[in-house]
Amino acid sequence: MLNWKTFLLLLIFLVLQPVIDVMTTASLMIFNLNLTVGVIVRVLYMAIILLLMLKLAFSSRLAKKYIFYLVGLAVVIGINIAVNMNLKDPYFLFKELKFYNKVIYFPILFLGFNLLYLQLKKNRVPFMEKTTTYFLYSSLIISAVFIVSFLTGTSLSNYSHTKIGFTGWFFAGNEIGAIMAIILPITAVYAIEKTESLKTSHYWIPFILLSISMLFLGTKVGYGGIVIVLAAACISLLIIYLTKERTKKTRANMLIALLLLAALAVSTPFTPVFNNMYAHLGLLNIDLSKEKPSKEVPEDSEEEPEEVKEEPKITEEQFQNLVFSSREKYLADFKQDFADAPVLQKMFGMGFAGNYDMPEPGKEPKMIEMDFYDLFFSLGIIGFLYLIAPMLYYAVRFIIYFVTQIKETFNIPYIMYGVGFILAAGIGATAGHVFTAPAVSIYVAAIMSVLMVDSRTVDDN
């Protein structure tokens, strides 16, 4: 019989994620292995979660429902593979299967974590506090890797040319950036809950270290994540102070968050992301210092010619490129492919990378790297709706609960965990590498499950 210690042990896997990612980098760069440590370990973990669900299905009605849902998902993906094997030419089966392994990771872990947290809840284990602690440990490992690699000059570069940025010893810059942005609000939960006054402000150090590491990345995701988390902390603490708790603790945390936001604003011109924005503008031939021709004056006039600054004009296309970094071009291609696709592909999807042509030597078919579009075009109307149905159902139920019980639910853990999920959804929608990246989606699954189980949105009665 499984006990609560077994479930807690499965949850500790969250702490190991940065270690697995560093080992994945070693697999790729030192040993040149295609089958990395990360792939093997995460597939094994997913298999364990599936076995846990099967075991619980003997005693849990909810687990039975989840198993039926996953069987249905397997059928939908099976139909997708069968359709595209007959319609796509060329068709790379291994790449398709590899992609769908990433697609199913999030729903399996989300449903598995729901059951795991329910078991911990039944045994009165403080699962939200435990999860916050495990996220904190994970953030400290990430920060340590970034700082040590930077100081030793062994950090990998996040960009190949023009732009500045570092990824520590992590191979995938987009993925580690998303992970840090998603973890950051959870480190804020730890800081705010532990800080009683300015004298105990050292509890904010893990948050600061992770923020500095995010600035090293040089990405909009990293910088934007810090701004959003600090702004959310300031606003929520102010509301709590005005409506609930006029305490020294709330004042101290609000002041610290404001000071950190001010420090970020002052240091922005010296950050890699500031340089990279100007580099990106240069690539688009946008000159922000453009001047209008001097105003003409009569020859016999003593008046000096007046130089008038011209407002730089950025076209809609250039603006989209600044935000989406060329993803909008791939999106336009996929939309056209979907419009031209047969009905079966519209219903069950075009598979990995859409209806691609035979790639040139050394190149591979590309995704859009905007998760919701990638999932929609890959799975089709039926497949996409089936995939997101349980997550959407629980999310709507939680929002209704949060709003109707606002006096109880408007607290720092709920707000910051909610910010973590909102950041995940936003990054997934604009920069990708969240819901189709197991290294990232495991954190999202944990955050979402914690909120669902703690709020009784997920229940097994």
Image (cartoon, rainbow, N blue to C red):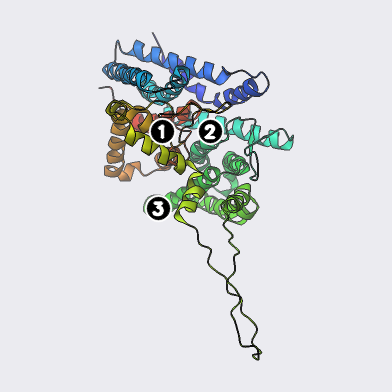
- Indicate the secondary structure of the residue bearing disc 1: helix
Q: Earlier in the sequence, mark 1 or mark 3?
A: 3
Q: Is residue 117 left or right of 215 when viewed as pictured?
A: left
Q: Amino acid at mark 1?
A: Asp
Q: Is residue 365 left or right of 449 when viewed as pictured?
A: right
- Indicate the secondary structure of the residue bearing disc 2: helix
Task: Answer few, some or many: residues within 10 Å of disc 1's Cα (few below 14, many 20 plus, some between 14 and 19).
Answer: many
How far separated are the C-alphas under marks 2 and 1?
16 Å
Task: Answer few, some or many: residues within 10 Å of disc 3's Cα (few below 14, many 20 plus, some between 14 and 19).
Answer: some
Quadrant position of the N terminus in the picture: top left
How far separated are the C-alphas under marks 1 and 3?
38 Å
Q: Is residue 287 left or right of 119 when viewed as pictured?
A: right
| Residue at (31, 33) in percent of width and height | 392
Q: Is residue 151 left or right of 112 when viewed as pictured?
A: right
Residue carrying label 3: 239
Task: Answer few, some or many: residues within 10 Å of disc 2's Cα (few below 14, many 20 plus, some between 14 and 19).
Answer: many
- Residue 200's place in the image compared with 134, above or below, is below
- Indicate the secondary structure of the residue bearing disc 3: helix
